[in-house]
Image: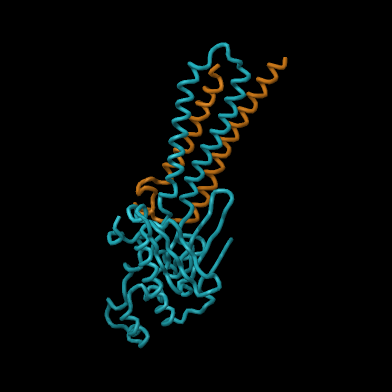
Chain colours: A cyan, B orange
Amino acid sequence: MDSDFVKPLQSHDMDLEPSVQDGPKTPSNANPVNKQLSQTPRLIESVLEPPIDNTNRNFNGQQKNETVLCFSRKHWIVLLPHFIMFVIFLILVISFVAVSGEVIGPTTNPVLYRSFALILIAAATYYLHRFFIRLLNYYLQIIIITNFRVIQLDRTLFFQRNMDSIDLSQIQDIIFERHGILKTILNYGEIVITLSSAYASKTIHYMPNPEYHFRKINKTKREYIIARGLAKIPASEAPAGREVP
Amino acid sequence: MHYTLYMTSLWIIFGIIQVGSIGLTLLSLQRLYSYIRRYRFSESKYTLLFGFIHLRWITFAYLSIMIAWIAVSYGIFTII
């Protein structure tokens, strides 16, 4: 999948919002600040003058003028070992059911057989649940890029609930890494975000299409910094840097 | 006497495993849906597993396979 062919993931992408420079000259865009704004991308304008209230629109904690630009899950390669094990499991179960009728004769002790079968059933039931819960957990681990921050939701159904939010202004440097044949062919890699704060860096592993996300974060960060400088958004309005609910 | 008691115990354990299994399935699905209700994104081929597998397909498969597994394990348990 070539990154150049990746389209915006959200139908309400900010690039689609109407711009103030499209309309006739009004007192509002005659203002020097708005004149300066008219030369900036539409994204910035929509940050400063949000057309709609986005509070909690896509996720809880979303700011009023925060828009989700794209979101992603990890690459499917993380599930490949589990799929292989599941196929082996299915083969074993089918073989056992097919063969056991012939191997186990009428002379076999029923108590011994049922004890053994019960252990196998318990183990197989545990494995089935583990496989499916892992599969469902895959859908819960999301990376969201908004016009304010990068959010990594890392939670599982039962035992883990982490939410890491990185304000775009805190990002000092972004690196994307894709080493190896498999990563190049399947188009996944790591995105390393170096922060200006005490948290030195943050690595997002198994990121699909890392080049696209790298460019997206870079572009959004640039525009966010310009917009914040123009609007002088107070720090109190900016989202928290790191959050573990 | 011991034989009957032992077999009854095995059946009780078998029942507990299956009831627990269905309970865990329902609990997992309930937690999953309570979670995804809080995160409302429009999915696309770039976000779905392998580009086409929807979450509801997996939940349906999970529920179906766990119900089918009860029948299969009952067959294995009573094959003799």
The relative height of residue A196 versus residue A86 in the rendered view (above or below) is: below
Q: Is residue A177 above or below residue A235?
A: above
Image-quadrant location for residue A212: bottom left
Judging depth in this view, the residue of A146 and B49 nearest the camera is B49
Position of the C terminus of chain B by quadrant: top right
Q: Residue furthest right?
A: B1
Point 49% across, 17% down: residue: A101
Residue A46 appears at what percent x and percent y? 38, 73
Residue at horizontal 48 percent and vertical 23 percent from the top: A97
Give the quadrant of the N terminus of chain B.
Answer: top right
Q: Residue at x 43, y 44 (%)?
A: B56
> Does residue A132 appear left or right of residue B16 in this picture?
left
Which residue occupies 46% across, 56% down? A142
For the residue pair A198 and B49, the one nearer the viewer reads as: A198
- Give residue A104's position: percent from left, percent from top: 53, 16
Query: Which of the 4 image quarters holds residue A245?
Result: bottom right
Task: Indicate left or right for A241 with A146 as reference.
Answer: right
Q: Nearer the viewer, residue A217 or B42?
A: A217
Give x and y (percent) for residue B77.
56, 22
- Residue lying at the far front in this picture: please name it: A180
Q: Is residue A54 above or below residue B48?
A: below
Considering every residue shown, the one lying at the far bottom of the view is A32
Q: How many marks?
A: 0
| Residue A194 percent across, percent down from the top left | 47, 70
